[in-house]
Amino acid sequence: MNKKVVREGFTLKEQPNMVDFKNDEAEVRFRSIFEQSPYGIVIIDTRGKIIEFNQTAHQDHGYSREEFAKLNIFDINPFQSPTEIRANMREVLRKGKSVVEVKHRSKDGRVRDMHVSTHVVNLDGRRVFQAIWHDITERKQTEKTLRSYREHLEDLITERTAELSKVNKELQTDIFRRKLAETRLKESEERFRRIFEDGPLGMVVLKPGDTILSANKALHDMLRFTDRTLEGRRLIDITHRGDRKKTADHIRQLMKGEIPLYQLETRFVKNNGEILWANTITTALRNEREEIVYALSMIEDISDRKLAEQKQQVLIHELQDALAKIKLLRGLLPMCAWCKKVRDDNGYWKKVETYVEEHSDASFTHGICPDCLKKNDPETYDNYGGRIRTEFKKERRKHERITLKEPFSCVASLHIREAKNTVFKATVDNISEAGACMQTDYPVETNAILMFRSGLKDKSGIVKWSKKLPSGNRYHVGIKFLSAEGLGKA
């Protein structure tokens, strides 16, 4: 695994990279699904940084891949404060998943409604968020339009009922008012008829008993019926067999006055045998005596949305299957204290490398360490042991030494054989537990003893070499640190 090195004081720590996919069959399948998904897919760490994303994710927001890689979740969701977003992230970590609708802002400033499904997954031993989103701005606008039509239709129905009531009262007292009321009624009916016939949604008026009294052109087109052949049928007759019971139960409750209206996602059977998914809103129509005389049902075709939801579920299952095939080895392994074999789940003892290869995607190469070489082949160890130890020591010092990105200054007290103290300033370039390299404008001699305060930890050392730099009166000095015992002997 690739690793990166970070500095903490005088020691080193190695951390694994955030994303390190292996080039195996599962990864190829996962990457293909990931990149070709019609939905935006992003991997987000617990700090809100976007660490992996597919092409759809950045193109939908108008960013290039390089621009999107520099963003975090706070940049594309500016409608919530960072505090609110972090609180939501903690809640998702606790529950393991969430499905929400949020607003995103694209590069050109447009506000878009997004449906976001988030799952917490383990990636290289670290918990991250996998978010799958798709744009529902158009659907939101359609729902808004539908609500507007529904509210407008309810207003018209209320207006018509009020007008009918007013006309009926006037007919009882004055024939002139009756004629006037008839004129107004015709106008109201004409408006209702135009809305009913020319509306974009399928509409049907039901008589008690579920019989279709009237159906508009939009519904006939949806279900591929012609020449007004729906009138006289029962609504149950064109409903899918699996949805008939719940539709019949809701119509019965509506006609009895037990519920004012109902909304269902229902499947209808077209004239050619195909299935139509529809969002159905049905309400009761009452006369002036508040008696239920008809039911009005508005039908919206949502087949495309249901198909998209099914494809989304298939994609999510495929992604989850692909992630599940990425093997991780964790937990406690029983190991023999003598032969170092590992016991598997079936109780068999196996070599460590055999067990790891069976339970992970790692493979082993073999070599021999200096201790084993000395034990099993002393002659070879004597011939090559010195060179091996020297190379190992150089490699160890290379990894132990910290090269400082920003060198720090320190104040040192210098002792050179005779008893005198000289205080000078020095700048430390790199440092380890064994020694350090620094620059100073004081001509330090080899084998001089230094005691200096770095601001982090007091050190004592001996000058092993000193070189004058070409630029100005500056000296490059190498120091070997001394322990308390070594300092006393010196």
Image (spheres, grey):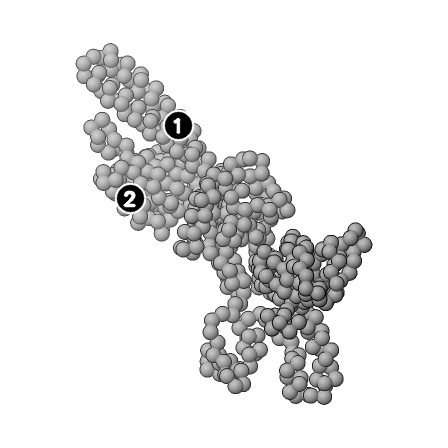
- Residue type, numbered disc 2: His
121 or 132, nearer to the observer: 121
What's the CA distance linking mark 1 and mark 2?
25 Å
Image coordinates for residue 40, horizontal then vertical, percent = 54, 48
The part of the image, by quadrant, that contains residue 168 is top left
Which residue occupies the extreme top position in the image?
A: 176
Does residue 404 show up?
no
- Residue type, numbered disc 1: Ile
Q: Earlier in the sequence, mark 1 or mark 2?
A: 1
Task: Name the residue at 55% across, 81% down.
Answer: 351
Q: Which mark is residue 250?
A: 2
In the image, is 411 to the left or to the right of 227? right
State whether residue 47 is above or below residue 217. below
Secondary structure category for the residue under label 1: helix
Task: Name the residue at 47% across, 74% down.
Answer: 332
**Residue pointed to by mark 1:** 195
Does residue 123 show up?
yes
The part of the image, by quadrant, that contains residue 172 is top left
Bin the neighbour count of mark 1 within 10 Å (Cα to Cα): few under 14, some 14-19, many 20 and up.
some
